[in-house]
């Protein structure tokens, strides 16, 4: 191709005979409309990009996909985008020497306000003679050996970052805040408060403002009145509302349907709405909008004189009624000062690091969501132990939905079961060279990934500090032919960029500390771990123990099968271990209050009915609990003790229920057993 006479170089061409990396990223995973989002759709960035490259002459064997960053923002650092970090490492390793990086558009690579990361990318490509090809809207080939093309690429990357800085941060968000703070508009910051609607009529004098909706305000007032009638007891208030909810009526026909779409209360089966939970009720009872003060993103908005922002013809909630609720439930007053009459709640979580639940990130259940909790909340009592796994579902009771806990499993007990099984497995594989090699390969990959992140973060910190020095040095240098001092505007721009870099440097420093902290719990070689595992497990840091569990387990599934018995299923990452299951007897089942029907059964039959016949009527109550209730009710038991099997089973726990007994008989489990052996269900995931 002839040389360009103006610049004296050969125009870059597609390097179809050399390896190419196809990089794709789409920031919004919800953008699936091909007509409105063709330039950034997943198909255009992945399948179509590969098809385009093949049509240009690349062979499929030398096209390498970097598509793992779909859904991640271009403002993220390279160490926060797995495939961008992998691309950086592969370029450094020489995998694409004299080759190509293909992207759909330049902004798919970076939206980098710091200007550090795309300059790092340029340096890597230049050092390894890698060109960048942007496919859309027109073909551009950037050869960084050429200064003009390098500056053009920098300009495109800067333009992409400026869109975030200028349009999103500089215009859209401040405009919404101005509308909310100074103009009193709703501005889309959160959902409209309960009892208010947004005026969406462009021709209305109250356009985009919150206006009271009387049918709902009346129901809000009823909640305030109920809370006062019950003496300011929020738990009692919530229980009363579960039994007899206050229903918000359906919106009238004239109300814009967008208000109903943003109304976050639950649908009532008979029509209307009701508060979903205690937090919703508390939020309503502490919202200052009912007395004319506006809260925007948690900050109460008032005039410079401390006056109200919103004036109502009549008070929506009487001030005494509002203050009664607010100063019992809110954490701070209107000026942000802590309210001193609140009883402090103390949470004990072992050094505040949530050091309980080794299986926290792997445990699930077929019976609901498993949440890992500390043992409880205390007011000065002895700190609780190691936490629990709670199986919870959202269920309906008294026409309301609430969280129902099916089981509370001590973390330490379940963790011990799985850890013991893990130790049995690792002692077995200590004899198998192939297993050791597989372990080493996975462990090495994890360490390499972390090392790569640390390397990138450290390099970025160094580059940022160098750029900060360069920028601050410019502040004192005269410019132009006349050596005039920098203009005020130029100084402001430099200082602004220095601030952006400093903010990024602090983030990188924190990221480096986090990565180093994770490395402290890193795993060594398999031989080393086997030698130390049994002896030093109690001395390992909690992070290292959880890291070990996460490394070896894909998932743990728990299921309540009777009052005390649970099924525990583990899917190991190691193929030879496969999927295993066992049954485990919990020493303590779920605590449930006695119902009136159950109490009536005990009153009628406790005195004369044989033990197991009575337990069959109360299948989830152990004999210990039934006997305790009988004693409390002062009912003497006239049925004589028997060892014939009708009223006695040797070795059976007195806390065991009839459902436990039936389960053990069905599974042929000994009555004094605490668990069954592990059984392999399958060899492969």
Image (tube, rainbow, N blue to C red):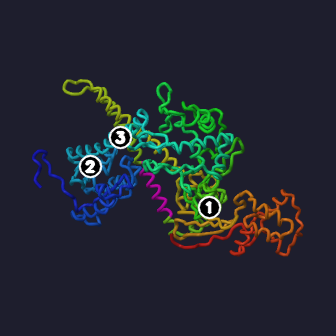
Q: Are marks 3 and 1 in contact (CB under 8 Å)?
A: no
Q: In the displayed structure, would residue 618 be above or below residue 277?
A: below
Numbered label tally = 3
Q: Is the magenta region chiefly helix, strand or loop? A: helix
Indicate which disc, 2 or 1, sits on the residue closer to the N terminus. 2
- Disc 1 secondary structure class: helix
Residue 443 forms part of the magenta stretch = yes
Left or right side of 674 for 602: right
From the viewer's perspective, is the residue at label 2 or at label 1 nearer?
A: 1
Within-10-Å neighbours for mark 1: few <14, some 14–19, many 20+: some
Asked whether 590 or 558 is in front, the reply is 590
The percent coordinates of residue 84 (x first, y second) are 36, 53
Asked whether 469 or 34 is in front, the reply is 34
Q: Locate the N terminus by quadrant.
A: bottom left
The percent coordinates of residue 513 (x first, y second) are 49, 44
Left or right side of 42 for 352: right
Within-10-Å neighbours for mark 3: few <14, some 14–19, many 20+: few
Q: Which residue is mark 3?
A: 203
Q: Which residue is mark 2?
A: 126
Q: In the displayed structure, would residue 114 be above or below residue 108?
A: above
- Disc 2 secondary structure class: helix
Q: Which mark is residue 673?
A: none
Q: Residue 200, can we see it?
A: yes
- Disc 3 secondary structure class: loop
Q: Quadrant of residue 642?
A: bottom right
Rounded to the nearest angstrom, the CA distance separating label 2 from label 1 is 50 Å
Q: Which residue is mark 1?
A: 419
Q: Residue furthest front?
A: 253
Indicate which disc, 3 or 1, sits on the residue closer to the N terminus. 3
Residue at image point 70% right, 64% down: 563
Residue at image point 36% right, 55% down: 31
Residue bounds of the magenta highlight: 439-454
């Amino acid at each position: 191709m002839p040389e360009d006479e103006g610049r004296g170089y050969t125009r870059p061409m597609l390097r179809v005979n050399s390896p190419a990396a196809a990089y794709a990223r789409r920031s919004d995973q919800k953008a699936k409309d091909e007509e409105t989002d063709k330039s950034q759709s997943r198909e255009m960035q992945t399948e179509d990009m590969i098809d385009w490259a093949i049509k240009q002459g690349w062979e499929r064997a030398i096209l390498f996909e970097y598509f793992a960053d779909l859904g991640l923002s271009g403002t993220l650092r390279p160490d926060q985008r797995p495939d961008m970090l992998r691309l950086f490492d592969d370029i450094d390793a020489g995998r694409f020497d004299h080759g190509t990086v293909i992207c759909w558009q330049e902004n798919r690579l970076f939206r980098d306000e710091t200007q550090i990361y795309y300059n790092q990318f340029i340096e890597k490509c230049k050092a390894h003679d890698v060109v960048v090809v942007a496919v859309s809207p027109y073909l551009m080939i950037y050869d960084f050996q050429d200064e003009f093309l390098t500056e053009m690429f920098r300009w495109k990357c800067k333009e992409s970052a400026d869109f975030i800085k200028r349009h999103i941060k500089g215009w859209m968000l401040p405009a919404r805040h101005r509308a909310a703070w100074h103009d009193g508009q709703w501005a889309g910051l959160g959902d409209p408060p309960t009892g208010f609607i947004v005026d969406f009529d462009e021709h209305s004098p109250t356009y985009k403002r919150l206006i009271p909706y009387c049918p709902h305000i009346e129901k809000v007032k009823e909640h305030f009145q109920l809370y006062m009638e019950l003496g300011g007891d929020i738990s009692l208030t919530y229980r009363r509302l579960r039994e007899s909810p206050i229903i918000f009526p359906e919106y009238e026909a004239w109300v814009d349907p967008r208000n109903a779409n943003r109304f976050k209360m639950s649908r009532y089966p008979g029509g209307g709405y009701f508060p979903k939970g205690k937090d919703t009720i508390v939020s309503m009872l502490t919202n200052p909008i009912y007395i004319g003060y506006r809260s925007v993103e948690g900050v109460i908005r008032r005039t410079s004189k401390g006056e109200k922002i919103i004036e109502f013809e009549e008070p929506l909630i009487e001030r005494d009624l509002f203050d009664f609720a607010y100063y019992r439930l809110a954490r701070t007053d209107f000026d942000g000062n802590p309210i001193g009459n609140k009883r402090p709640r103390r949470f004990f979580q072992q050094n505040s690091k949530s050091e309980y639940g080794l299986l926290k990130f792997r445990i699930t259940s077929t019976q609901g969501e498993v949440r890992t909790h500390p043992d409880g909340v205390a007011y000065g009592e002895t700190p609780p132990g190691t936490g629990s796994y709670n199986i919870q579902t959202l269920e309906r009771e008294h026409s309301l939905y609430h969280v129902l806990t099916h089981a509370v499993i001590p973390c330490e007990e379940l963790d011990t079961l799985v850890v013991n099984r893990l130790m049995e497995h690792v002692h077995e594989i200590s004899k198998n060279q192939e297993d050791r090699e597989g372990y080493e390969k996975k462990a090495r990959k994890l360490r390499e990934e972390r090392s790569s992140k640390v390397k990138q973060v450290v390099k970025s910190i160094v580059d940022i500090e160098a750029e900060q020095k360069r920028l601050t040095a410019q502040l004192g240098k005269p410019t132009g032919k006349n050596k005039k001092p920098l203009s005020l505007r130029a100084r402001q721009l430099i200082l602004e960029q220095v601030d952006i870099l400093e903010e990024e440097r602090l983030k990188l420093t924190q990221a480096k500390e986090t990565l180093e902290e994770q490395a402290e719990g890193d795993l060594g070689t398999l031989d080393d771990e086997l030698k130390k595992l049994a002896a030093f497990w109690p001395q390992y840091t909690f992070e290292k123990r959880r890291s070990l569990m996460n490394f070896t387990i894909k998932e743990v599934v728990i299921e309540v099968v009777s009052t005390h018995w649970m099924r525990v299923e583990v899917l190991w990452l190691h193929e030879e271990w496969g999927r295993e299951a066992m049954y485990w007897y919990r020493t303590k089942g779920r605590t449930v209050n006695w119902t009136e029907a159950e109490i009536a059964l005990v009153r009628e039959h406790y005195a004369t009915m044989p033990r197991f016949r009575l337990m069959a009527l109360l299948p989830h109550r152990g004999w210990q609990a039934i006997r305790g209730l009988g004693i409390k009710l002062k009912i003497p038991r006239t049925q004589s003790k028997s060892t014939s099997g009708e009223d006695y089973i040797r070795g059976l726990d007195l806390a065991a229920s009839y459902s436990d007994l039936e389960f053990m008989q069905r599974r042929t489990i000994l009555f004094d057993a605490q668990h069954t052996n592990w059984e392999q269900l399958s060899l492969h995931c």
